[in-house]
Amino acid sequence: MKFAVIVFPGSNCDRDMHHAVQEVLGEEADLVWYQNSNLENYDGILLPGGFSYGDYLRSGAVASTSDVMNQVKEHAAKGKPVLGVCNGFQILTEAGLLPGALMRNKGLSFMCHQEALMVQNNETMFTGGYGKGEVVRFPIAHGEGNYFCDAETLAELKANNQIVFTYENNPNGSVSDIAGITNKEGNVLGMMPHPERAVEALLGSDDGLKLFKSIVQNWRESHYVANA
Amino acid sequence: MRKVTVYITLKQGVLDPQGKAIQESLHSLGYKEVQEARVGKYIEMQVEDGTDIEVEARVKQMCDKLLANPVIEDYHFEVEGAVRS
């Protein structure tokens, strides 16, 4: 399976993401600069964390208007996997690929530590390897991770099982303790915690590895069926 | 050229932790009368001239597409010299 890690000016978790996929997971990954890019030959798109365009205007807002995001939308419309982590999640909401918005943390501080998350939905292409209700530990590193949506949207998220990860101890004020959501179709996941920084036990946790393995396994299964 | 001024504010009901911190700071300076502070954005643009309707329609698009996030923010704007309808 071949992944593209999209690199914007100001991305800073792109190499972590690339390392997780290529070195730890053992799949192909390219760092793809956001300009003059062609995503046609990639099976999965990864939007890494960081501070694209210095978080100017709103975090993710400027990156969401770039041409590469139109390609990401086309990729998503085909049902292929798109994962946005941290700033990647912010870009996905700004681009309208995911509902809601990410606001300044309730306590105003930038936070960088490990958080316990509960897997609320293990029937997505990203979480098939986890148990439902399993508690995993991923690092967070954000100043604007406070997920907000209106009551109507929240009801929809719940009704469609789009809430995939919740915080056990809500660090940032997110509504309903939301740490990660998918789109209605289930092939676009945005999350503030960093699974790509939790792929080696030596570095504190390898709970994130199952997320990447789930994507690959799902892709292999759907490919096998498609080609059979 | 026309000057366009865009004001962006957080929607009522959306928590503004930054505004709350400012309010608390003002209180600590003795300005206890401040009941609420909310932080917004102010954007000035110089745009090519057109009819009032054209300019206003374009600016509205800019606000909806980029300048404001309709999930959390409200906006209003003023176009220099435009006759308010």
Image (spheres, rainbow, N blue to C red):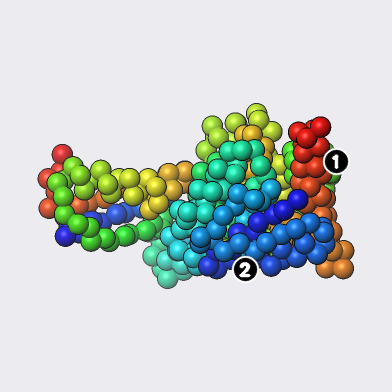
Vertical relation: A104 (above or below) A224: below
Query: Is A97 on the left or on the right of B85, as rendered?
Result: right
> Is there any visible trace of residue A56 in the rendered image?
yes
Quadrant where the C terminus of chain B lies? Answer: top left
Question: The residue under label 1 is which amino acid type?
Answer: Gly
The circle drawn on residue A12 is 2
Residues at marks 2 and 1, common chain?
A: yes
Identified at 55% across, 43% down, the residue is A74
Identified at 82% across, 59% down, the residue is A26
For mark 1, does the 10 Å Cα neighbourhood hold few (<14), some (14 to 19), or many (20 or more) residues? some
Query: Callout 2: residue from which chain?
Result: A
> Earlier along the polypeptide chain: callout 2 or callout 1?
2
Query: Is A151 on the left or on the right of B83, as rendered?
Result: right
The circle drawn on residue A131 is 1
The circle drawn on residue A168 is none
Query: Callout 1: residue from which chain?
Result: A
Question: The residue under label 2 is which amino acid type?
Answer: Asn
Judging from the image, what secondary structure is the residue with disc 2 in? Answer: loop
> Is there any visible trace of residue B20 in the rendered image?
no
- The percent position of residue B78, horizontal first and vertical second, equals 22, 51
- The percent position of residue A125, horizontal first and vertical second, equals 75, 40
Label 2 – label 1 distance at C-alpha: 31 Å
Vertical relation: A32 (above or below) A170: below
For mark 2, does the 10 Å Cα neighbourhood hold few (<14), some (14 to 19), or many (20 or more) residues? some
User: Which residue sits furthest top?
Assistant: A159
- The percent position of residue B38, horizontal first and vertical second, equals 41, 55
Q: Nearer the viewer, residue B18 or A147?
A: A147
- The percent position of residue A52, horizontal first and vertical second, equals 53, 64
Q: Nearer the viewer, residue B76 or B64?
A: B64
Identified at 18% across, 42% down, the residue is B53
Judging from the image, what secondary structure is the residue with disc 1 in? Answer: loop
